[in-house]
Image: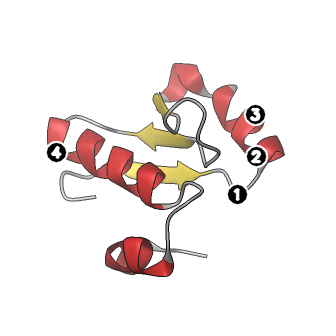
Amino acid sequence: LACGALVILGRDKEENSILKTYADKGLIISPTPGVPGPNALVLSCESKEDEQMARSIVAAYSKGTTEADRVRFKSFQIL
């Protein structure tokens, strides 16, 4: 992200659970309660700007969103 943070998203329930085990290594961001979606592990998050961007990514990839909601984050993908 802009200030150097790295965001790792879980793709399913199992990966979300695995990410939570690394809570001591960084910031865990979960989707809005009651809305299925990815958890994110954010590493080296030193700025509110990066934290907010990570929260926006989690929201964009949560259930009920469309490809149009995610298009602005395509440049961040490393598959």
Q: How many marks?
A: 4
Q: Which residue is mark 4?
A: 49
Find numbered disc 4 in the image and state the secondary structure of the residue it sits on. Answer: helix
State the separation of the CA atoms marked 2 and 1. Answer: 6 Å
Residue 33 percent across, percent down from the top left: 55, 29
Q: Which residue is mark 3?
A: 17
> In the depicted view, which residue is nearer to us: 22 or 40?
40
| Marks 4 & 3, CB-CB < 8 Å contact | no
Amino acid at dot 2: Glu
| Marks 2 & 1, CB-CB < 8 Å contact | yes
| Marks 1 & 4, CB-CB < 8 Å contact | no
State the separation of the CA atoms marked 4 and 3. Answer: 26 Å
Amino acid at dot 1: Arg
Image quadrant for the N terminus? bottom left
> In the depicted view, which residue is nearer to us: 38 or 18?
38
| Marks 2 & 4, CB-CB < 8 Å contact | no
Which mark sits nearer the N-terminus, 4 or 3?
3
State the separation of the CA atoms marked 2 and 4. Answer: 25 Å
State the separation of the CA atoms marked 3 and 1. Answer: 10 Å
Q: Which mark is residue 15?
A: 2
Residue 14 percent across, percent down from the top left: 83, 43
Residue 56 percent across, percent down from the top left: 34, 52
Q: Which mark is residue 26?
A: none
> In the depicted view, which residue is nearer to us: 32 or 8?
32
| Marks 2 & 3, CB-CB < 8 Å contact | yes
Which mark sits nearer the N-terminus, 1 or 4?
1
Q: Which mark is residue 11?
A: 1
